[in-house]
Amino acid sequence: MESDNSKTQNHQNHELVPHKGFKLISGTHDPDDVDQIYNLEIRDSDVFVVTYPKSGTIWMQQILLLLESKGDVSAISQVNNYSNGDLIPWIELNGNRQAFITAPSPRLRVTHLQYQFMPSALSHKGKVIYVARNPKDVLVSYFHFHKLANMLETPKDFNDFFEKFLKGDVFGCSWFDHIKTFHAHKDDMNMLFITYEEMVQDLQSAVERIALFLGKELTDEQLANVVKYSTFNNMRKIPQANYEQVPGDLLSHQQGKFMRKGTIGDWKNHFTVAQNEKFDEVFNKEMEDFPLSFLWDVSDIV
Ligand code: PPS
């Protein structure tokens, strides 16, 4: 088993670098390249999945690919043309912007970038799916991910990470700014705004909504297969979907699983009463005028 030390050594090549109000990861993102994303030409068939980290990006990747293949799960195992092991490429990763320009349609991409970096042409072409997740569970998922992701610093302890997250001192910056800005601009793009919690609550309905938004016509049987192969338990068994195949220099797999719990309310196993009160105070202030509410516990599902 590799020691924590090896993760520290791998991490030494990466650090958060401020860039135009956001933070990029050195060695992973190139600021000039990221700036050029804004000018990309967009096709009607392009789809961008936008998320704050740990909000269900990989889950949405799986659903989109299954919708493309009409529920044929063998199509997932054939996706192995990305050296970093992603099913759908991140537009902001080094080299991926250039590849996007000549890629065949449909060009499906994911991103954690803030609104100001998005291709401006998305205002009249292409589609955007924004996946939001309650930020307490995002924080917990992100804390655990920092322990296995070599491009991110291993947290000193949970409280240290808690404070960094609230300050936006992580890749993705402030969760509050990310969601508020995209939501404020949702009518400036052809955007589907969907939550992780809705997907947990009723995956079938969520998949139907996504299919309708993308104009995908599938038979009931095909749709049932999309749902079947995008459940947490089934995705966990598919090596291409569960991130097991992401190379060891990016993820220290012995430190934990990418597909960790996949539920709502795990924050209750991590937050102290004092941390919860502090979080609620910041949340209530930041989200005062936000029109949507969140599900905070799996038992809140009706
Ligand atoms: S990343 O690194 O930002 O791309 O991570 P992201 O994919 O956005 O989020 C990872 C969390 O999503 C959970 N996940 C799922 N939950 C429920 N059902 C399915 N099918 C599913 N697929 C992925 C994954 O387990 C991470 O959440 P946690 O809470 O850590 O388990």
Image (cartoon, grey):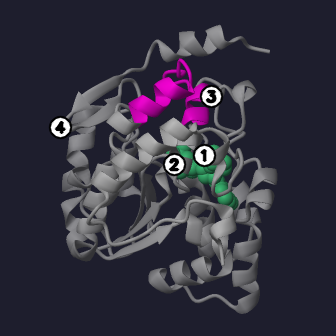
55 to the left or right of 263: left
140 to the left or right of 98: right
Highlighted magenta segment, given as a residue range: 143-165
Between 261 and 3, the residue placed more toward the observer is 261
Is the Cβ of the residue at disc 3 closer than 8 Å to that at disc 4?
A: no
Label 1 or label 4, whichever comes before in sequence order: 4
Q: What number of labels is visible?
A: 4
Between 283 and 6, the residue placed more toward the observer is 283
Residue hosting label 3: 148
Residue hosting label 2: 136
Q: Secondary structure at mark 3?
A: helix
From the image, state whether disc 3 or disc 2 is nearer to you.
2
Q: Which amino acid type is marked by label 4?
A: Lys
Label 4 or label 2, whichever comes before in sequence order: 4
Q: Secondary structure at mark 2?
A: helix
Q: Quadrant of the C terminus?
A: bottom right
Q: Secondary structure at mark 4?
A: loop
Q: Secondary structure at mark 1?
A: helix
Quarter location, residue 98:
top left
Is the Cβ of the residue at disc 3 closer than 8 Å to that at disc 1?
A: no
Label 3 or label 4, whichever comes before in sequence order: 4
